[in-house]
Image (tube, rainbow, N blue to C red):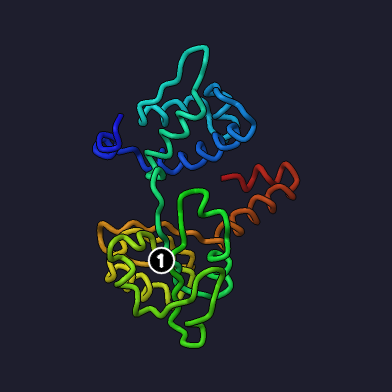
Amino acid sequence: MSVDSAAKRGIPDATVARLPGYLRSLDGFVAQGIGSVSSEELATRSGVSSAKLRKDLSHLGSYGVRGVGYDVGHLRYQISRALGLTQDWPVAIVGMGNLGRALASYGGFAPQGFTVVALLDQDDAVVGQRVGNLVVQPMEVLPTLTEGGRAAIGVIATPTASAQDVADRLVAAGFTSILNFAPGVITVPAGVQVRKVDLATELQILAYHEQRRALPDELRLEVAP
């Protein structure tokens, strides 16, 4: 199935959300020198059922070979192609506080096809500072970043109070994909994709499970959803 036909057919959002997990598992098999895996092996490592895995991969036109399983290298390529990872994606990070600096210094983006090409902040005291290999630029340069595809994905790493304004400026500059690390909800026009990463919410969910684990069995049953 070609990239164009895959895009036209579309893949369910729930499946798209699981594809990175399959890709991570396949990278693990590659590192182990494993050339083929069964749906059960890949599903177990990815934390899903084998039936769900097979259904997800069927959207890519990949069904495996009975008695052999999936070719790891080929399946990895199929998933990478479906996710758009057969090309590099330039990323701009807005907000050079502790989180923004940590993201800018993270070395795990480039191997996955994401290159941080610009760092921005609205604080004049921060603009001009060097973070890693880049110099922090003022917000006014945003419109120039989308010219010629210099940047494709915007990352918001600002406090909540600034997030909506930053989102508005990213959209106005031509960004159509935004990753938001700021707590709270931002509003964007139709056609702009936003993914939210809320670390506090994830910790709260973990706290809930830790609390339930500490309860006696009889009380755990009473508070079960």
- Taking the image as shown, residue 56 lies to the left or right of residue 131, namely left
Q: Residue at x 34, y 68 (%)?
A: 145
- Secondary structure at numbered mark 1: loop
How crowded pointer 1 is (Cα within 10 Å; few <14, some 14-19, many 20+) is rated as few
Q: Quadrant of the N terminus?
A: top left
- Taking the image as shown, residue 105 lies to the left or right of residue 151, namely right
- Taking the image as shown, residue 51 lies to the left or right of residue 32, namely left
- Taking the image as shown, residue 186 lies to the left or right of residue 216, namely left
Q: Is the residue 147 above or below the residue 26 in the image? A: below
Q: Quadrant of residue 54?
A: top left
Q: Residue at x 55, y 29 (%)?
A: 42
Q: Is residue 72 visible?
A: yes
Question: Seen from this angle, which residue lies furthest front?
Answer: 133
Q: Quadrant of residue 17?
A: top left
Q: Quadrant of the C terminus?
A: top right
Residue type beneath disc 1: Val
The x and y percentages for residue 8 are 24, 38
Query: Residue beneath label 1, please?
Result: 185
Residue nearest the observer in this picture, 67 or 51? 67
